[in-house]
């Protein structure tokens, strides 16, 4: 009996051992996708790549410094670079993602892992693909990694160079902790990855929005221009506390050589794009000596998906993938149902960069005559009648036409006498006109409005906001609201509070009923030929300043004059004059100015003024952004007595203060990342 | 019945055992300190905030993380600092301001001088840092008020000689003679006594920029500045003068200051 039980037990144990020796139950789980599934064929790779591309850190309609990537709320490109200001935006960029989403640091590593997995695993599955397709896919892996590290390097300097998949829990923690490398090593990694991508990628993309050789070359030229500028202009450097590695800045002993190397790379990459002949400046509607055609041409180029100027665009399509650019930036009088408007009001400082405007000796717009009285204009549009067509394509000026309407921008109405001319408005208590920052910040404080000083009666009329107007009876008996229908207003910033509204990117054919959040579907141009020309010109100028001949033997001055000349001709700007190209420093100044004019509102200038390290130090209306500085606006007024307009130029009424310290050119590493890691260093000195 | 009392008992034990006292004492040590000009024994006046004198504590006795997270606070405008909520332990105390850096590192990252303090903080611990400020500012006479404008006179002079500055800074690499140039002189006005680079009224404050060595001749001589705009009658404002050289410590070019004066604008 006892034996029987013993035998049974033995059988039972034996049975268990034997049956568990078979692996027929060892099937891969159905709910986990493995490398075998992903790297199987073109179709599966398309899925993998679309996930990668959807995380690509492209600065388009879904990027703003306040909310970082992939967030299209209140997107107003230009408001942090000084080209424009907005009610909800307008300050120097000292960190990123402060409004929500936080720092890019943490997001970047997700895409980086996808890229590393592709680069590491695809070679094991090379048999599944034709050689050309295999190279294309590998190229996209390297391209992605280059773009990610470029986005990181310009924000943080030296980065942990994770070029292999990190496997947890297979690897011990000590192997997974990767310290930050030097900034130079990081830029070299960007360079190496771009070069690999350029070598592998085909000349044309087979998927919309996918990478190709020329896209990689163009972004390489932009990234290398960044690296070269940092090596040359950056002054802050230091060593990490934990590792002693120079995590920001370049070694002063090798910085000059590094900067020349990067500028050479930038130049060569840009020239290869230009020499390919694949792209050209958009000239479909352009016509010599026809400013209207030139203007229309520059408007259309942002909407023509077939433009030869486009190197890479980010496409949108309702209802799958949309943004809200029109909704946030529309002039007040055309406001859509969500109630946003004029989120992006260009500064007078930006407008003054353009040609065809009557200016004072210091480059500011001429609004006073030689006696210090306002110049009167019969029509509100007269002051910009001869302005460069590119300005009109960038900015809605007072009286511009848009969607069949006249954009009605007027700060107020002046009913005083015009005999002997109208005196400057910014006067308080009968004092001298005060256009300094201590002067009146709003027109409701000036004597003409408050009836003080030299004004015995109120002679200036303003509107409180879009629905509360002071109404003036005109000599012809009709009534007129003090402010225009698109502002600016005294007490809210829903109007054109600098006197201008952005024109670039606004869809001229969108019915007002559709001007809603998440309804716009125009594409964003991430890279266009004009920028490549500007990259080549800037790199050539920097090499000339460094005393280096251009690698392909071209004459730097001639080349810069050619490229800038092409851009100016297309824009309808003045031709290059001799004193713009007297010295190489003059040429650099000219190239930089052209960049600001051509690429404003395209999320490029913000990074340019950072890499030039000029944002904190450039004089700005009597101050610098290191101390805090302000931009200016241009305010149109209508004189009922003269039946004419005059313009008051001065600090804008919102008094948005821009302030950036030199050390803020590098963003802080998220403090949680520094605290939890034994190797990740915070920026030195912070 | 017995079962129920068991359950109750288990519940009670769990309840009681979770009442354990937090294993860490309050941070109740005090660190007090002064920043003194080594040459004169005067306190080194500063701005309040990130452009002023920064005190950085690193608790070296902390071993729960690989390296201690720096704990920063800022000096008061009189050149003294105090923190009454510090954990007991062994610390490195480092200060950075408008004076020769105490921790000097050369181009290859090697420490060439370390004058920071390594101390145990327990009870009330006092430290005194003797530093060499870049500049010294002194009032001359009493500021006068006329029509809402304040006119003040002060002297800006070097507190560290060119030679001393060079001897200490040059080994750090990339030395440039123009580090010593005075780049700007200011008269800050504010309605708060904490007037300085972080707290000034831009309507009245004055900045005078100097390029190259153009201020060199003015060093040691009285500088007179009249404020901008018109300060309304009856207001009380606070003023102080500041100047800085073309040299950044920890990435920031910091000002040296004189003491704050209270000025009443008569009615």
Image (spheres, grey):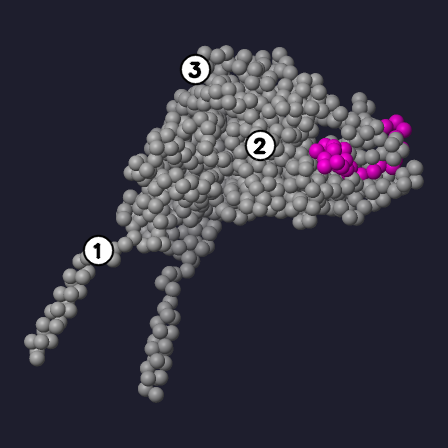
Q: Position of residue A432 (x, y in %)?
A: 78, 32
Residue A603 located within the stretch drawn in magenta: no
The secondary structure making up most of the magenta span is: loop
Question: Compared to A22, does B139 lie above or below?
Answer: above
Q: How far apart are marks 1 and 2 (CA)?
A: 56 Å
* Residues tagged by mark 2 and mark 3 found on one chain of the structure: yes
Residue that badge 3 annotates: A551
Q: Can residue A631 be seen in this view?
A: no
How many neighbours does mark 1 have within 10 angstroms: few (below 14), some (14-19), or many (20 or more)?
Answer: few
* Residue at the (47%, 50%) spot, across then down: B82
Q: Can residue A283 be seen in this view?
A: yes
Q: How far apart are marks 2 and 3 (CA)?
A: 34 Å
Q: Where is residue A222 in the image (x, y as percent from the top left)?
A: 48, 28
Q: Are marks 1 and 3 in contact (CB under 8 Å)?
A: no
What quarter of the picture does the N terminus of chain A occupy?
bottom left
Q: Where is residue A107 in the image (x, y as percent from the top left)?
A: 44, 44
Secondary element at image label 1: loop
Left or right of A562, for residue B14? left
Left or right of B129, for residue A604? right
* Residue at the (15%, 61%) spot, across then down: A18
Secondary element at image label 3: loop
Mark closer to the observer (1, 3): 1
Mark 1 / mark 2, whichever is N-terminal: 1
Q: Residue B60 carries which label?
A: none
How many neighbours does mark 3 have within 10 angstroms: few (below 14), some (14-19), or many (20 or more)?
Answer: few
> Magenta residues?
A396-422
What quarter of the picture does the C terminus of chain A occupy?
top left
Residue that badge 1 annotates: A23
- Chain letter of disc 1 in the image: A
Numbered disc total: 3
Q: Residue A305 carries which label?
A: 2
How many neighbours does mark 2 have within 10 angstroms: few (below 14), some (14-19), or many (20 or more)?
Answer: some
């Amino acid at each position: 009996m006892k034996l029987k039980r013993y035998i049974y037990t033995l059988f039972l144990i034996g049975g268990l051992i034997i049956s568990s020796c078979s692996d027929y139950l060892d099937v891969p789980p159905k709910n986990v996708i493995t490398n075998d599934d992903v790297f199987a064929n073109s179709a599966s790779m398309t899925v993998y790549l679309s996930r990668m591309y959807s995380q690509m850190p492209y600065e388009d309609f879904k990027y703003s410094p306040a909310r970082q990537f992939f967030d299209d709320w209140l997107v107003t490109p230009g408001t942090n670079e000084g080209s424009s200001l907005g009610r909800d935006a307008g300050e120097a960029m000292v960190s990123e993602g402060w409004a929500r989403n936080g720092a890019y640091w943490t997001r970047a590593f997700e895409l980086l892992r996808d890229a590393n997995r592709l680069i590491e695993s695809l070679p094991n599955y090379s048999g599944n693909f034709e050689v050309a397709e295999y190279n294309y896919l590998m190229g996209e892996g390297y391209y992605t990694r280059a773009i990610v590290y470029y986005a990181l390097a310009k924000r943080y300097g030296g980065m942990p160079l994770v070029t292999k998949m990190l496997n947890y829990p297979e690897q011990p923690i000590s192997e997974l902790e990767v310290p930050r490398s030097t900034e130079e090593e990081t830029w070299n990694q960007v360079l190496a990855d771009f070069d690999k991508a350029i070598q592998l990628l085909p000349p044309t993309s087979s998927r919309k929005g996918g990478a190709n050789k020329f896209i990689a070359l163009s972004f390489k030229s932009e990234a290398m221009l960044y690296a070269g500028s940092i090596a040359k202009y950056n002054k802050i450097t230091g060593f990490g506390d934990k590792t002693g590695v120079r995590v920001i800045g370049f070694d002063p002993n090798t910085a000059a050589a590094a900067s020349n190397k990067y500028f050479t790379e930038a130049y060569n990459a840009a020239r290869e794009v230009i020499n390919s002949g694949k792209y050209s400046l958009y000239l479909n509607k352009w016509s010599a000596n026809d400013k209207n055609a030139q203007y229309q041409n520059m408007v259309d180029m942002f909407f023509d998906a077939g433009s030869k100027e486009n190197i890479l665009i980010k496409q949108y399509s309702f209802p799958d993938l949309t943004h809200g650019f029109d909704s946030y930036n529309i002039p007040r009088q055309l406001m859509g149902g969500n109630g946003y408007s004029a989120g992006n009001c260009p500064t007078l400082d930006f407008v003054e960069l353009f040609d065809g405007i009557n200016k004072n000796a210091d480059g500011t717009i001429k609004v006073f005559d030689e006696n210090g009285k306002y110049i009167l204009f019969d029509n509100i549009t007269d002051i910009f009648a001869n302005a460069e067509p590119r300005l009109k394509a960038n900015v809605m000026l007072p009286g511009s036409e848009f969607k069949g309407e006249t954009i009605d921008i007027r700060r107020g109405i002046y009913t005083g006498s015009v005999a002997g001319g109208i005196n400057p408005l910014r006067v308080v208590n009968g004092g001298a006109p005060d256009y300094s920052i201590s002067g009146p910040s709003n027109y409701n404080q000036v004597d003409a409005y408050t009836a003080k000083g030299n004004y015995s009666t109120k002679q200036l009329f303003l509107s409180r906001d879009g629905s509360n107007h002071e109404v003036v009876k005109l000599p012809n008996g009709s009534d007129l609201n003090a402010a225009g229908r698109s502002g600016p207003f005294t007490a809210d910033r829903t109007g054109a509070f600098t006197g201008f509204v952005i024109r670039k990117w606004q869809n001229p054919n969108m019915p007002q009923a559709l001007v809603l959040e998440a309804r716009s579907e125009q594409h964003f141009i991430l890279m266009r030929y004009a920028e490549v020309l500007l990259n080549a010109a800037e790199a050539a100028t920097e090499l000339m300043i460094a005393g280096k001949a251009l690698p392909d033997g071209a004459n730097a001055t001639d080349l810069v004059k050619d490229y800038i000349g092409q851009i100016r001709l297309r824009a309808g700007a003045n031709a290059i004059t001799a004193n713009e190209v007297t010295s190489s420093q003059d040429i650099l100044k000219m190239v930089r100015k052209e960049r600001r004019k051509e690429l404003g509102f395209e999320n490029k200038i913000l990074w340019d003024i950072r890499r030039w390290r000029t944002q904190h130090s450039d004089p700005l209306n009597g101050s610098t952004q290191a101390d805090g500085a302000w931009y200016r606006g241009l305010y149109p007024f209508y004189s009922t007595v003269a039946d004419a307009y005059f313009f008051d130029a001065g600090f804008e009424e919102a008094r948005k203060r821009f302030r950036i310290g030199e050390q803020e050119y590098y963003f802080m590493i998220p403090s949680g990342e520094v605290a939890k890691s034994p190797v990740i260093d915070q920026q030195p000195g912070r | 019945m017995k079962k129920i009392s068991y359950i109750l008992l288990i519940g009670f034990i769990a309840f009681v055992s979770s009442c354990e006292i937090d294993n860490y004492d309050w941070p109740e040590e005090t660190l007090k300190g002064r920043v003194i000009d080594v040459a004169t024994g005067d306190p080194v006046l500063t701005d309040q905030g990130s452009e002023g004198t920064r005190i950085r504590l690193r608790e070296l006795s902390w071993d729960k993380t690989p390296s201690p997270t720096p704990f920063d606070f800022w000096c008061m405008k009189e050149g003294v600092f105090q923190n009454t909520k510090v954990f007991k332990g062994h610390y490195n105390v480092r200060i950075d301001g408008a004076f020769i850096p105490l921790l000097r590192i050369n181009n290859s990252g090697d420490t060439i001088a370390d004058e920071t303090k390594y101390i145990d903080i327990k009870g009330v611990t006092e430290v005194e840092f003797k530093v060499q400020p870049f500049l010294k500012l002194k009032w001359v006479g009493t500021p006068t008020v006329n029509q809402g404008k304040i006119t003040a006179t002060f002297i800006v002079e070097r507190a560290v000689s060119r030679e001393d500055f060079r001897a200490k800074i040059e080994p750090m690499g990339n030395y440039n003679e123009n580090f010593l140039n005075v780049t700007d002189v200011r008269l800050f006005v504010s309605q708060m006594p904490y007037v300085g680079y972080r707290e000034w009224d831009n309507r009245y404050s004055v900045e005078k920029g100097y390029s190259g060595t153009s201020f060199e001749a003015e060093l040691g001589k009285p500088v007179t500045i009249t404020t901008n705009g018109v300060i309304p009658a009856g207001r009380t404002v606070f003023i102080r003068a500041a100047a800085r050289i073309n040299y950044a410590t920890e990435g920031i070019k910091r000002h040296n200051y004189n003491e704050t004066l209270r000025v009443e604008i008569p009615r």
